[in-house]
Image (cartoon, rainbow, N blue to C red):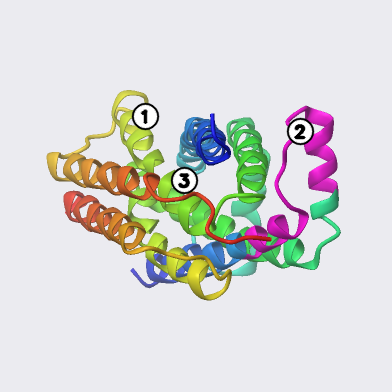
Amino acid sequence: MLTGAILYFLIVVPGTGGEMCMSRAMKTIGEVTDFRPHAIARVIGRAMKIPWFWIGITMMATGFFALLGMLSVAKVSFVFPATAISYLFGTLGGKVFLGERVTPQRWFGVLLVCIGVILVALGKG
Amino acid sequence: MTSSQGLHFKTVVLIVIMVSIAPLGDVFLGKGMKQIGAMPGWAPSELFRFFFAAFTSSTIWIGIGLLLAFFVAYLVVLSWADYSYVYPASSISTLVVALLARFVLHETVRPLRWAGVAMICLGVFTVGRTQPRTTER
């Protein structure tokens, strides 16, 4: 139980925070318009020179290892939906940390996602 | 196609690519971890054995490869789209995960869980109708 709770926290908080850092790194680079493989490789190379990228990688790796641990103790169709509460956390982060304009419609959509997440968790019962 | 429509279109295309690859990667990871068995405990030697077993499994490496491809698509879409758009929109993958769990892993997926997945789809549809980019460089 405690193991599950620790893993759950590690999946949600560093996992989401890491993705926000990635988003910040990619916004620094700017919109990708060339989708050829070598162009995308160059973009990734440029991203790797931005500190936010490595902060993001470290946090996401923490979340990923926690996910591996969680998958060994629970069903795959439960693990992913149950961790989706991080969508609320992520949207809040997008607004506060990344300065995105989260409209009421977007909040409503995220709320529906969260209700869905709770139903999925109850469905595991 | 206006630039706004174009932005919407390429955002949706990349999200579709993401949610097609990631759940498949997750299934491979899930299958691989089930083969290894439950995490024995938090002692360093136990953790080391556990992760060593994980990283010598070919099933897990296929999962990691698919998730890396997902990650590149994710980075590309984040170069223009809001995180608060892409992240909730990508939760549509729960539908793909439930379908894969039911029909590939043969797990039992109860009706309430399907209802949750349907609610998530509705939420994604609602988020999907907002502007993908609200910040200007």
Majority secondary structure in the magenta region: helix
| Residue situated furthest left in the rendering | B111
Residue depth check, mark 3 versus mark 1: number of the one nearer the observer: 1
- The local secondary structure at tag 3 comes to loop
According to the image, label 1 marks what residue? B100
Name the residue furthest bottom: A96
State the residue position of label 3: B37
Q: Distance between the residues labelled 2 and 3?
A: 43 Å
**Amino acid type, residue under disc 2 in the picture:** Asp
Residue A29 colored in magenta in the image: yes
- Residue B50 visible, this angle: yes
Find residue B137 and report its horizontal and vertical position in percent: 69, 61
Q: Position of residue A42 (x, y in %)?
A: 85, 41
Chain designation of label 2: A
Q: Which amino acid does label 1 sit on?
A: Leu
- The magenta region covers A21-45
Q: CB of mark 3 within 8 Å of CB of mark 1?
A: no
Indicate which label's residue lies in the foreground, 2 or 1: 2
As measured in the structure, the alpha-carbon distance from the residue carrying label 2 to the one carrying label 1 is 33 Å
Q: Kindly identify the residue that appears in the image at 46 percent across and 53 percent down.
A: B85
> Which residue is denoted by mark 2 in the rendering?
A34
Which quadrant of the view contains residue B62? top right
